Image (tube, grey):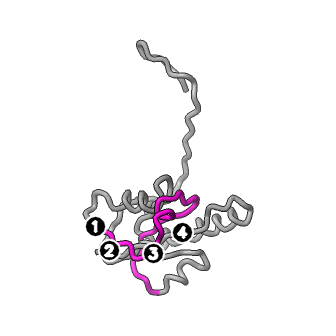
């Protein structure tokens, strides 16, 4: 894609889009939905680029996708630049739901890029280990 407008010249560049079809009933956003639910992080050690790490990430994504289809995940956010702190903030902004971190996370981890990690808002905590089916997870937040 390139172009010019008056005195402005735009150099050629690649623009890519990804498209998928999914039932609208299974689409969720990142904004927090309810009070009295928990926020979990999955795939805490997902930074490994090894084949084993990629297989684990595929298992993690399949598990999360299944939880979304079952209606267990209310909202989700990937952990990118700014780490967990930025991801939690993006989920909370604009909805007037306060957060209180209940996990003990050092500041280095709190602001570190978490490749292939997801924050998940899940209603109810009974049987949470069974929901995650062997995927590493940790409770981060309880709403106040």
Q: CA distance from mark 3 to mark 4?
A: 24 Å
Residue 116 drawn at (x, y percent): 58, 60
Q: Evaluate if marks 2 and 1 touch, with contact meaning CB atoms under 8 Å apart.
A: yes
**Residue plotted at (56% across, 69% down):** 44
Q: Few, some or many C-alpha atoms within 10 Å of disc 3 (few <14, some 14-19, many ≥20)?
A: few
Q: Magenta span has 113?
A: yes
Picture layout, residue 10 above or below residue 115: above
For discs 4 and 1, the disc positioned in front in the rendered view: 1
Q: Which residues are magenta?
A: 97-126
Residue 32 image point, x, y percent: 35, 65
Q: Nearer the viewer, residue 29 or 97?
A: 97
Say which label, 1 or 3, has the lower sequence index.
1
Query: Which badge, 4 or 2, is on the more N-terminal residue?
Result: 4
Q: Earlier in the sequence, mark 2 or mark 3?
A: 3
Q: Residue 2: say if magenta.
A: no
Residue pointed to by mark 3 = 104
Q: Mark 4 = which residue?
A: 64
């Amino acid at each position: 894609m390139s172009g010019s407008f008056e005195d402005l010249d735009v150099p050629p560049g690649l623009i890519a889009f990804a498209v998928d079809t999914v039932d609208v009933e299974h689409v969720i956003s990142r904004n927090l939905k309810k009070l009295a639910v928990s926020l979990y992080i999955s795939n805490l050690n997902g930074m490994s680029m090894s084949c084993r790490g990629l297989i684990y990430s595929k298992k993690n994504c399949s598990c999360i996708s299944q939880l979304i289809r079952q209606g267990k995940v209310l909202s989700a956010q990937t952990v990118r630049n700014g780490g967990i702190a930025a991801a939690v903030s993006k989920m909370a902004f604009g909805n007037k739901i306060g957060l209180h971190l209940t996990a003990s996370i050092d500041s280095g981890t709190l602001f570190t890029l978490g490749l292939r990690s997801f924050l998940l808002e899940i209603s109810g905590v009974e049987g949470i280990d069974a929901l995650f089916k062997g995927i590493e997870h940790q409770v981060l937040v309880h709403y106040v």
